[in-house]
């Protein structure tokens, strides 16, 4: 089977990046996502922006400011937007259907928050036999009660590097190594 990649950009929404919820290296993560998205578009690979719809909890309500993607993200008209309703992007969303229609078998994962929606989505994708590349420096979170944000990020990168995949594979790579692989064929 030919590798058909898709870039998932999870929950990079204004409501997750406030003064009350500062995130680690936001500017750097946004730059990495923009760079990856540009390469994916050049290769005609899909870019999917995942946006949390928390209407049932009266937060992240579609078309409100907190629901919107960060202004610094470069989003193309051909990019795909997927609503999600739980930490796991696959849960009751259109994601699986869209990936099937696009014949995608490899997910490249970025976004926020490392220890919630990014983690849940990776776990779900592993059990669905996808080949997965987590961009080591392309996800972010905030400080937690017992850990600083960079420790949470380092911990989950370690967890994912040591996961046992099902029929797929899982890699954790910094963006420059991933791009080097892509560009060198």
Image (cartoon, rainbow, N blue to C red):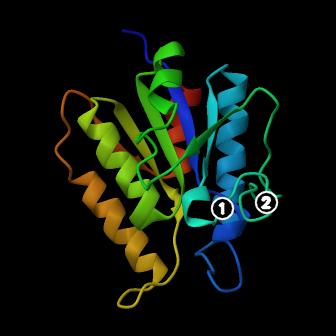
Residue 56 visible from this viewpoint: yes
Kindly report the distance in space between the C-alpha atoms of the residues bearing marks 2 and 1: 7 Å
Task: Kindly identify the residue that appears in the image at 66 percent across and 21 percent down.
Answer: 43
Indicate the position of residue 122 as horizontal and vertical percent values: 36, 47
Quadrant containing the N terminus is: top left
The tag on residue 64 is 2
The spot of residue 69 in percent (x, y) is: 74, 54
Looking at the rendered structure, the secondary structure element under dot 2 is: loop
- Residue extending farthest bottom: 145
Disc 2 vs disc 1: Cβ atoms closer than 8 Å? yes
Between 31 and 19, the one nearer to me in the picture: 19
Q: Quadrant of residue 12?
A: bottom right
Residue drawn at 36 percent across, 53 percent down? 120
Horizontal arrangement in the rendering, residue 137 relative to residue 3 (left or right): right
Q: Which residue is the site of mark 1?
A: 60
Which numbered marker is on residue 28? Answer: none
List x then y, in percent, for residue 137. 52, 59
Q: Residue furthest top?
A: 1
Vertical comparison of 142 with 118: above or below = below
């Amino acid at each position: 089977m030919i590798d058909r990649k898709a870039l998932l950009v999870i929950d990079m929404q204004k409501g997750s990046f406030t003064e009350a919820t500062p995130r680690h290296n936001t500017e750097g993560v946004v730059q990495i996502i923009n760079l990856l998205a540009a390469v994916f578009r050049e290769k005609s690979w899909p870019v999917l922006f995942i946006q949390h719809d928390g209407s049932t909890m009266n937060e992240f309500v579609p078309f409100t400011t907190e629901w919107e993607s960060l202004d610094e993200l470069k989003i193309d008209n051909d990019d795909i937007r997927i609503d999600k309703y739980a930490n796991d992007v696959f849960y009751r969303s259109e994601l699986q259907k869209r990936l099937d229609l696009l014949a995608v078998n490899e997910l490249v994962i970025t976004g926020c928050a490392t220890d919630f929606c990014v983690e849940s989505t990776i776990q779900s994708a592993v059990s669905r036999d996808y080949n997965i590349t987590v961009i080591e420096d392309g996800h972010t979170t905030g400080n937690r009660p017992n850990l600083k944000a960079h420790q949470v990020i380092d911990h989950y990168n370690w967890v994912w590097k040591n996961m046992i995949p099902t029929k797929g594979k899982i890699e954790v790579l910094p963006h420059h190594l991933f791009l080097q692989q892509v560009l060198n064929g």
